[in-house]
Image: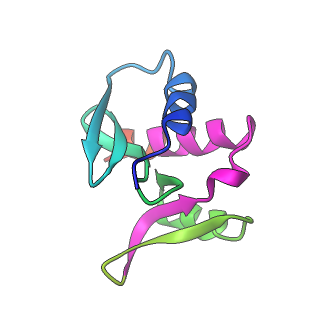
Amino acid sequence: MAYDLELAERVRSALDGTPDVAERTMFGGLAFLVGGSMAVAVSGGGGLMVRCAPALADELVTRDGVARMVMQGRELAGWVLVDPATLDDVRLPEYVAAGVGAAREA
């Protein structure tokens, strides 16, 4: 499955004005890097992958449509996957900001 082009454009808009942003296609999706570190990615499998502090991940997974990111059967600490149906104009910028903050800390 190709990544969601509309969601990618919404992420670009949320990142508008953020310095040192780059885009890179990875694993069938589109990753957005800040300062060379991945912040968020529009997943080829659907949804938004968000990098965040592990403590924030614990909080975010209590929200509807947010799950821990799992790759090859293992949970990725500090990563969550957000269902695109829950990404309204309030939540999307929040998740993008969390990803940018985590990327800057990396």
Total tally of numbered discs in the picture: 0
The answer to whether 28 is drawn above or below residue 18 in the figure is below
What colour scheme was applied to this rendering of the protein? rainbow
Q: Which residues are magenta?
A: 74-100
The answer to whether 23 is drawn above or below residue 71 in the figure is above
- Farthest residue to the top: give it: 17
Q: Quadrant of residue 60?
A: bottom right
In the image: residue 73, left or right of residue 27: right
Q: Nearer the viewer, residue 74 or 57?
A: 74
Query: What residue is rendered at 49% in x and 15% in y?
Result: 17
Residue 70 placed where, x, y %?
41, 74
Query: What residue is rendered at 52% in x and 61% in y?
Result: 81
Q: Nearer the viewer, residue 75 or 98?
A: 75
Query: What residue is rendered at 26% in x and 37% in y?
Result: 24
Query: What residue is rendered at 57% in x and 27% in y?
Result: 14
Task: Determine if the magenta segment contains residue 42.
Answer: no
The answer to whether 97 is drawn above or below residue 54 in the figure is above
Task: Determine if the magenta segment contains residue 81.
Answer: yes
The answer to whether 26 is drawn above or below residue 66 in the figure is above
In the image: residue 83, left or right of residue 78: right
Q: Quadrant of residue 88?
A: top right
Q: Nearer the viewer, residue 100 or 13?
A: 13
Quarter of the image for the N terminus: give it.
bottom left
In the image: residue 48, left or right of residue 22: right
Residue 23 placed where, x, y %?
31, 31
Residue 103 placed where, x, y %?
37, 43
Residue 31 placed where, x, y %?
35, 42
